């Protein structure tokens, strides 16, 4: 079966459906029906969405099924949300996708992209590279994976941080998908391997 075109081949504008026909009784319905946002997805995006739903949103299982790493699965989910028009309110995730797109297009260097992603995690605009705290984040990451204890108190003790800075690091690791959220006094869990965490930090 042929795939329904979602863009005009002449001008590139989105298409609408003008005629619907029942294959059973041949009844036709004419009108001007806009396409669903899901109709505009590319084949690869739709396949990822179906896999995501089949595994109930578990990105680790999605990655295993598709043969991709957790960070890659997360980035594909971000790209899918943007394709569906849900970029508003994504904040850090949307900024990260924008930065990666600029890197892909050759507009910035790998080094610039790493700095900008770190800046996005601190609430800075995508055009604002910053260098601070990268070493601190890497040290905190190693402490967590070596001790297997994901507590802000461990960072306060080993890195001599105050409570606010230790919690800030915890929050950044949450946003990156490295550790689970702290809810109802439940123990936090690692969501990725150490190597995948390094990849998320741009190492």
Image (cartoon, rainbow, N blue to C red):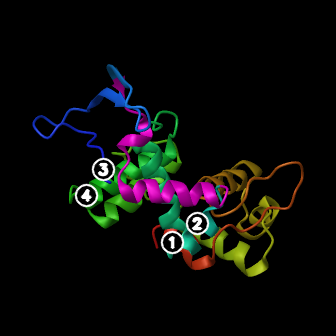
Mark 4 vs 1, N-terminal side: 1
Q: Which residues are magenta?
A: 33-56
Asked whether the beta carbons under mark 2 and mark 1 sit within 8 Å of each other, the answer is yes
Q: In terms of depth relative to the viewer, which is nearer, 51 or 117?
A: 51
Q: Residues within 10 Å of mark 4 (few under 14, many from 20)?
A: some
Outermost residue, left side: 10
Determine the image quadrant of residue 22. Answer: top left
Q: Residue at x 31, y 66 (%)?
A: 110
The image shows residue 150 at horizontal and vertical percentages of 78, 66
Q: Is residue 128 left or right of residue 76?
A: left
Work out how far the residue at label 2 is from the one at label 3, CA to CA, in angstroms: 26 Å
Work out how far the residue at label 2 is from the one at label 1, CA to CA, in angstroms: 6 Å
Work out how far the residue at label 4 is from the one at label 2, CA to CA, in angstroms: 30 Å
The image shows residue 13 at horizontal and vertical percentages of 20, 32
Outermost residue, front side: 25
Q: In terms of depth relative to the viewer, which is nearer, 107 or 48?
A: 48
Asked whether residue 84 appears in the rendered view, the answer is no
Q: Residue at x 55, y 70 (%)?
A: 63
Q: Residues within 10 Å of mark 2 (few under 14, many from 20)?
A: many
Local SS, label 2? helix
Mark 2 vs 3, N-terminal side: 3
Look at mark 2 in the image and give the residue it sits on.
62
- Give the number of the mark in front: 4 or 2: 2
Look at mark 1 in the image and give the residue it sits on.
66
The image shows residue 101 at horizontal and vertical percentages of 31, 54
Asked whether the beta carbons under mark 4 and mark 3 sit within 8 Å of each other, the answer is no
Asked whether the beta carbons under mark 3 and mark 1 sit within 8 Å of each other, the answer is no
Look at mark 3 in the image and give the residue it sits on.
3
Determine the image quadrant of residue 103. Answer: bottom left
Q: Residue at x 45, y 49 (%)?
A: 80
Q: Is residue 148 left or right of residue 63?
A: right
Look at mark 4 in the image and give the residue it sits on.
108
């Amino acid at each position: 079966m042929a795939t329904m075109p979602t863009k005009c081949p002449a001008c590139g504008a989105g298409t609408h459906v003008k005629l619907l026909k029942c294959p059973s009784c041949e009844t036709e319905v004419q009108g001007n029906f806009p396409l669903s946002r899901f109709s505009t997805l590319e084949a690869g995006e739709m396949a990822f969405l179906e896999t995501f739903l089949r595994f109930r949103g578990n990105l680790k299982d999605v990655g295993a099924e598709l043969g991709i790493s957790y960070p890659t699965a997360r980035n594909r989910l971000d790209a899918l949300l943007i394709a569906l028009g849900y970029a508003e309110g994504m904040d850090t995730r949307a900024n990260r996708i924008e930065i990666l797109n600029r890197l892909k297009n050759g507009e910035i260097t790998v080094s610039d992209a790493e700095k900008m992603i770190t800046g996005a995690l601190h609430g800075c605009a995508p055009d604002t590279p910053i260098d601070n705290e990268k070493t601190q984040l890497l040290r905190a990451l190693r402490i967590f994976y070596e001790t297997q204890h994901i507590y802000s108190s461990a960072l306060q003790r080993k890195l001599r941080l105050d409570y606010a800075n230790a919690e800030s690091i915890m929050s950044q690791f949450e946003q990156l998908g490295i550790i689970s959220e702290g809810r109802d006094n439940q123990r936090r869990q690692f969501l990725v391997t150490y190597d995948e965490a390094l990849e998320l930090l741009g190492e």
